[in-house]
Image (cartoon, rainbow, N blue to C red):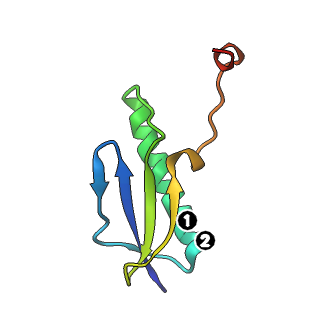
């Protein structure tokens, strides 16, 4: 099974994934990235903050970047009606 690496880019800079995870294909790797992003964002919300400007870069073990998943792709944000008009 191929191994993918998930490098995290956020307000703290770059956190390189040195271990990687096995996944059957790129779609499964994307699902793993989304799962990780949601977990990270959940921790942020617990701290009273939510920053959707980050991304995860998914690479093969060759170093080839196969895709990026932005934080805002991992969640749906619904705001109260009155917030949308400001």
Q: Are marks 1 and 2 in contact (CB under 8 Å)?
A: yes
Residue at x 59% of width, y 44% of height = 75
- Taking depth in this image into account, of 83 and 49 the one nearest to the observer is 83
Q: Looking at the rendering, which quadrant does residue 24 occupy?
A: bottom right
Q: Secondary structure at mark 1?
A: helix
The residue at the point 52 percent across, 57 percent down is 69
Identify whether 27 is placed above or below 41. below
Which residue lies under the disc numbered 1? 30
Helix, strand, or loop for circle 2?
helix
Q: Is residue 28 above or below residue 44?
A: below
The x, y position of residue 21, in whole percent, is: 41, 73
Image quarter of residue 72: top right
Q: Is residue 41 above or below residue 1?
A: above
- The crowding category of the residue bearing disc 2, from other C-alpha atoms within 10 Å (few below 14, some 14 to 19, many at least 20), is few
Q: Quadrant of the C terminus?
A: top right
| Residue ID for mark 2 | 27
Count how many numbered circles sit on residues in the image.
Answer: 2
Position in image of residue 39 (x %, y %): 45, 47
Q: Residue at x 29, y 57 (%)?
A: 15
Q: Residues within 10 Å of mark 1 (few under 14, many from 20)?
A: many
Instruction: State the residue lying farthest toward the front.
Output: 86
Image coords of residue 80 (percent x, y)? 67, 19
Cα–Cα span, label 1 and label 2: 5 Å
Judge left or right: residue 73 versus residue 58: right
Vertical placement of residue 18 versus 42, above or below = below
Q: Position of residue 74 (x, y in %)?
A: 57, 49
Residue at 61%, 71% (x, y): give it: 27
- Residue 12, by quadrant, is top left
Q: Which mark is residue 59?
A: none
């Amino acid at each position: 099974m191929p191994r993918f690496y998930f490098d995290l880019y956020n307000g703290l800079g770059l956190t390189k994934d040195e271990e990687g995870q096995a996944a059957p294909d790129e779609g499964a790797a994307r699902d793993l990235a989304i799962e990780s992003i949601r977990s990270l964002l959940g921790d942020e919300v617990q701290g009273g903050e939510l920053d959707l400007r980050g991304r995860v870069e998914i690479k093969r073990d060759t170093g080839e970047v196969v895709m990026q998943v932005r934080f805002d792709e991992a969640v749906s944000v619904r705001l109260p009606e009155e917030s949308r008009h400001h």
